[in-house]
Image (spheres, rainbow, N blue to C red):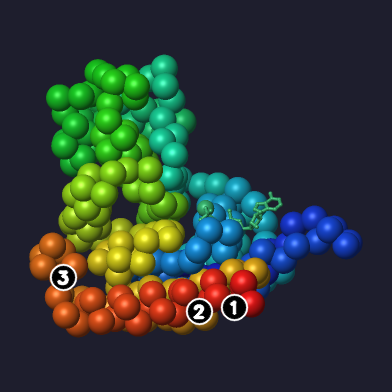
Amino acid sequence: MHLKVSAVCKSYGYGSNAKQVLDSINLDLYSGQFLALVGSSGSGKSTIMRLIAGLDRPSSGEIRFDGQLVRGPGADRGMVFQKYSLYPWLTAAENVAFGMELQGRNRAEIRERTAYFLEVVDLVDSARLLPRELSGGMQQRVAMARALAAEPKLLLLDEPFGALDLQIRESMQEFLYQLWQRTGLAALLITHDLEEAMLLAQTVHILAPRPGRIVRSIELPSDRSNLAHLRVSPAFLELREDLARTLRSLDGALVS
Ligand SMILES: Nc1ncnc2c1ncn2[C@@H]1O[C@H](COP(=O)(O)OP(=O)(O)OP(=O)(O)O)[C@@H](O)[C@H]1O
Ligand SMILES: [Mg+2]
């Protein structure tokens, strides 16, 4: 899998109302890689995600997935959004099965894969519950199982834990990291949480706002056997402070 985003710009509106949201975004992402984009609210993070998902088109530049121009959504790219996007009238299991039904897989395979992915996200006992009977973290795990069950090559995560309490968020980060390690998927995480990006991704791009553009890219050490330790290690904290300063200066530039 190779995702290539080349010189992508995006504007909304026309004439004097035109607003440039993204300026010359370049990204490369291959199988097994975990990339994060960090930026403040309004810096164009979700816009990038929507373009890669094929839900919207760039104003200029191009996005290629395995060499092919992205022209619309596809099962090769699985998405998990910030807000729980489950169908409220379907059970957890039915939500997981839904995408596979659209793909036209046969019943036995759907049943088998649903059971398997519910186990992966540790929700076997909740298979028959409706979304409103699940906690926020559980709903996000269903959303992840649903995305994974469709066998994407790339997992697109737009603030997947943004609505969760700090403690649940930390355990979900741990969960996502292990899941990614096990599956060898490519993952693109969009977040305003710098620590989250640094813990999970191998490469972090910092996005400046108005228009959204990548101003700094950092490679992170790959040894992450223990996220809880990493969170408080001196080198990690120092880098986090350094990047936080960058982010603050971008917001400051906006005010002045
Ligand atoms: N369909 C649209 N029409 C007009 N403007 C839009 C549209 N979608 C997004 N924008 C504008 O583009 C900018 C970036 O929006 P986007 O949702 O990508 O930001 P974001 O980084 O995801 O923010 P947040 O962290 O709050 O989710 C905002 O100023 C927003 O108002
Ligand atoms: Mg957003």
1 and 2 marks in contact (CB < 8 Å): yes
**Where on the image, by quarter, is ligand 1?**
bottom right
User: As shown in the figure, which amino acid type bears the numbered disc 2?
Assistant: Ser
Q: Where is residue 244 in the image (x, y as percent from the top left)?
A: 38, 75
The residue depicted at 23 percent of the width and 45 percent of the height is 168
Q: Under tag 3, what secondary structure? A: loop
Q: Nearer the viewer, residue 242 or 5?
A: 242
211 w.r.t. 176: above or below = below
**For the view shown, which residue lies furthest in the right direction?**
15
Kindly tell me whether residue 105 is visible in this rendering. no
Tell whether 67 sits left or right of 177.
Answer: right
Which part of the image, by quadrant, shows the N terminus? bottom left
Q: Does the residue labelled 3 lie within 8 Å of ligand 1?
A: no
Kindly tell me whether residue 164 is visible in this rendering. yes
The residue depicted at 41 percent of the width and 17 percent of the height is 89
Q: Position of residue 6 (x, y in %)?
A: 59, 74
Q: Mark 3 points at which residue?
A: 232
Q: For marks 1 and 2, give the CA distance.
A: 6 Å
Q: Name the residue under label 1.
A: 253
